[in-house]
Image: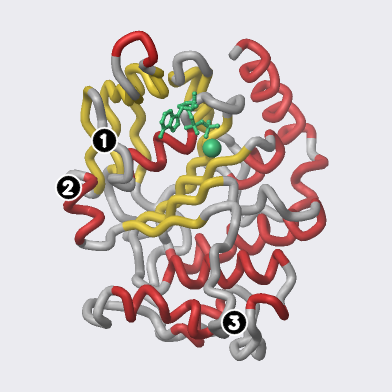
Amino acid sequence: MAATALAKAPASPAAAGAPAGNALSVRNLDVVFGKGDGAITALSNVSVDIPAGSLVTMLGPSGCGKSTLLRAVADLVPASAGSITVLGRTPEQARRERNFSFVFQDATLLPWRSAIDNVRLPLEVGGGSGTHDDPMDLLDLVGLKGREKALPSELSGGMRQRVAIARALVTRPKILLMDEPFGALDEITRDKLNEELLRIWQETGTTIMFVTHSIPEAAFLGQHVLVLAAHPGRVKEFVTVDLPFPRRLPVRDTMEFIQITARLRKLLEEC
Ligand SMILES: Nc1ncnc2c1ncn2[C@@H]1O[C@H](COP(=O)(O)OP(=O)(O)O)[C@@H](O)[C@H]1O
Ligand SMILES: [Mg+2]
C-alpha cells in the first residue's frame, strides 16, 4: 500500500507538524430557502470550527440541514446570513482553488469509463493543471489495485464508492466533504469501508467532514461529532470522541464506545 506519489501529511492531527488552526470556520450561519410564507430555514445560527486535519462526523435527523451545511461550505448554496471561512478563503475562492472535493451516497461514476479513467476525470475537467496525485497510486490507496480497467458495472457498490473516493482525492483537496457516502451499502461492506476511510485519512492528512445517519458510524469515524437538531437546523452539540487512533472495528465492543453511542442517542432523541 505504498502510494509513494501521494501528498504526505502527518499521520494524525496529533502528530508532529500537523497543520495548525481551523480548516473550516462557520459563524452564525443561516441558510433560508425561498421567500415569504413558504420560506424554509434549513440552518439557523450555526457556528462550528473544524480543526485542520481532523475528521468530523455530522449526525442528525432527516431534514436537519446536514447536506445543506456541506453544500454551503462547497459554495453550492449561498449563506443567507453569517459567514463561512474555508482555509482562510471564502467558499467561492476555495472552490476555484479546488480546496475541497465531494463524495455522495451514489458514486456517480461515468458508466462508459474504466475505474482509472473515472479517477482521472477531475484532472481532465480542470485542464490538467495544478498539483495532483497519480490515479494509479490512488486506486492502490483505496484497495483497487488490479481493477483499474474495470467498468463501474463490473464493480460492486463498495468498490464503486472506493473509486469515487480515489476520484475525490486526485486533485489533492485539503478538505473532503462526504455526504452519507456509505449509506447505500450493506453493513459488512460499510464496516470495511469505515476502517479503510480511517486508514486513508491517516495516510493523506485530509480534513474530512462526514455526514451520516448512523450513530455507530459517527462515533467510530469521528474525532468529533457535530450533532444537529431539526426545524430549524441548528447545532445541538459538538461531541468529542475520546477514543485513540488507529481505531479498528472491535473498539465498538468496548464500554467507552457504548457510552459514547448512548450519549449520542440521547442527544438525538432530544432533537
Ligand atoms: N434546494 C432546496 N430548496 C428548498 N428547500 C430545501 C433545499 N435543500 C434543502 N431544503 C430543505 O432544507 C431542509 C434541510 O435539508 P437537508 O440539508 O437536505 O437535510 P439533511 O441532509 O439533514 O436531511 C429540509 O427541510 C429541506 O427540505
Ligand atoms: Mg442529506
* Residue 218 picture location, percent across and down: 62, 39
Distance from disc 1 to disc 2, alpha carbons, whole Å, reads 15 Å
Q: Is residue 110 above or below residue 93?
A: below
Residue 89 disc label: 2
Is label 1 or label 2 in front? 1
* Residue 153 visible somewhere in the drawing: yes
Q: Residues within 10 Å of mark 2 (few under 14, many from 20)?
A: some
Q: Residues within 10 Å of mark 3 (few under 14, many from 20)?
A: few
The quadrant holding residue 262 is: top right
Identify whether 97 is placed above or below 31.
below
Where disc 3 sits, the SS reads loop
165 or 118, which lies in front? 118
Kindly identify which residue carries mark 3: 1
Q: Residue at x 68, y 71 (%)?
A: 159
Q: Nearer the viewer, residue 69 or 199?
A: 69
User: Residue drawn at (56%, 42%), measured in percent from left and top?
Assistant: 222
Q: Which mark is residue 111?
A: none
What amino acid type should be assigned to the residue bearing mark 1? Pro
Label 3 or label 1, whichever lies nearer to me, is 1
Q: Which residue is mark 1?
A: 78
Residues under numbered marks 1 and 2 in contact, where contact means CB atoms less than 8 Å apart = no
Residue 23 visible in the shown view: no
Judge from the rendering whether residue 70 lies leftward or rightward of residue 240; answer left or right. left
Going from N to C along the chain, the mark reached first, 3 or 1, is 3
Graded by Cα atoms within 10 Å as few (under 14), some (14 to 19) or many (20 or more), the crowding at tag 1 reads some
Identified by mark 3, the residue type is Met
